[in-house]
């Protein structure tokens, strides 16, 4: 069966960079909920309008909206290795993902945590070109709070299921990529 891998980690941990590498170097279909939401917003769809206010505050978009979006996207990816970037982000999303995958005869292969401390996240995002509205320092701190409160419980969730793999995200991108490859075997 083709693997399905979820990347976990705080904002600024480099999930997007690693997702792009796994796509380009290993043929994964990369599904980024943040990218899908930004595309919906740019296209001015109803979904984009709904999501906008949450994103601008650094809050999570409601689970039902996200799960419906991911369910649709996964319907086109049967038979392909899939990398989930930025999803799941809550325990409710993780439970829903298990159901969506079971309906398609699939299951999650691994959840790779790209581990980076908060001070590194704040330094990195304030140092990078801020072309995203939600990269303002106040919003980054809100996103970090949301990460700790709502997403971090997934570490124990996937650890308990034997699916968690940890990678030190404080290294340069090549070293992190090597860590991710090693974690996936
Ligand atoms: P980052 O990982 O740097 O925070 P993303 O591009 O993954 O950036 O997400 C940007 C924003 O999109 C989030 O702050 C949130 O508002 C929304 N979002 C993305 N993925 C999800 C998700 N799985 N559940 C809820 N909201 C999400």
Image (cartoon, rainbow, N blue to C red):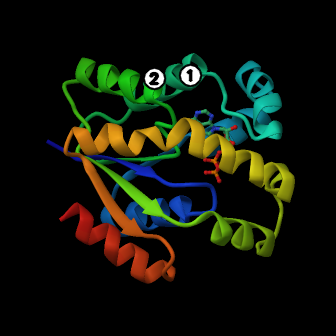
Compare residues 176 and 30 and report the one nearer the observer: 176
- Of the image marks 2 and 1, the number of the one nearer the N terminus: 1
Q: Is residue 75 above or below residue 77?
A: above
Q: Is residue 42 left or right of residue 13?
A: right
Q: Which mark is residue 63?
A: 1
Compare residues 171 and 52 and report the one nearer the observer: 171
Report the quarter where the N terminus lies. Answer: top left
Report the quarter where the C terminus lies. Answer: bottom left
Residue 59 appears at what percent x and percent y?
72, 35
Residue 112 appears at what percent x and percent y?
35, 55
Q: Is residue 44 left or right of residue 119?
A: right
At horizontal 23% and vertical 61% (from top left) the residue drawn is: 184
Compare residues 66 and 153 and report the one nearer the observer: 153
Residue 43 appears at what percent x and percent y?
77, 33
Mark 2 touching mark 1, by CB under 8 A? yes
Q: Secondary structure at mark 2?
A: helix
Q: Which mark is residue 92?
A: 2
Q: Within the image, what quadrant is residue 175 found in?
A: bottom left
Whether label 2 lies within 8 Å of ligand 1 gets the answer no
Q: Mark 2, mark 1: which one is toward the viewer?
A: 2
Instruction: Characterize the local packing of mark 2: few (<14), some (14-19) or many (20 or more) Cα atoms within 10 angstroms.
Output: some
Whether label 1 lies within 8 Å of ligand 1 gets the answer yes
Residue 31 appears at what percent x and percent y?
48, 44
């Amino acid at each position: 069966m083709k693997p399905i891998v979820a990347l976990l980690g705080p904002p600024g941990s480099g999930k997007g960079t690693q997702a792009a590498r796994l796509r380009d170097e290993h043929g994964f279909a990369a599904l980024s909920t943040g990218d899908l939401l930004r595309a919906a917003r740019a296209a001015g769809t109803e979904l984009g309008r709904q999501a906008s206010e949450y994103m601008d505050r650094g809050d999570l978009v409601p689970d039902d909206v996200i799960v419906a979006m991911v369910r649709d996207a996964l319907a086109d990816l049967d038979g392909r290795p899939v990398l989930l970037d930025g999803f799941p982000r809550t325990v409710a999303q993780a439970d829903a993902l298990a159901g969506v995958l079971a309906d398609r005869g699939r299951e999650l292969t691994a959840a790779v945590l790209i581990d980076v401390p908060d001070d590194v996240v704040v330094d990195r995002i304030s140092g990078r070109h801020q072309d995203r509205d939600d990269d303002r320092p106040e919003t980054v701190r809100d996103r970090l709070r949301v990460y700790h409160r709502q997403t971090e419980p997934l570490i124990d969730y996937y650890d308990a299921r034997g699916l968690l793999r940890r990678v030190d995200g404080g290294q340069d991108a090549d070293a992190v990529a090597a860590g991710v490859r090693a974690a996936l075997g």
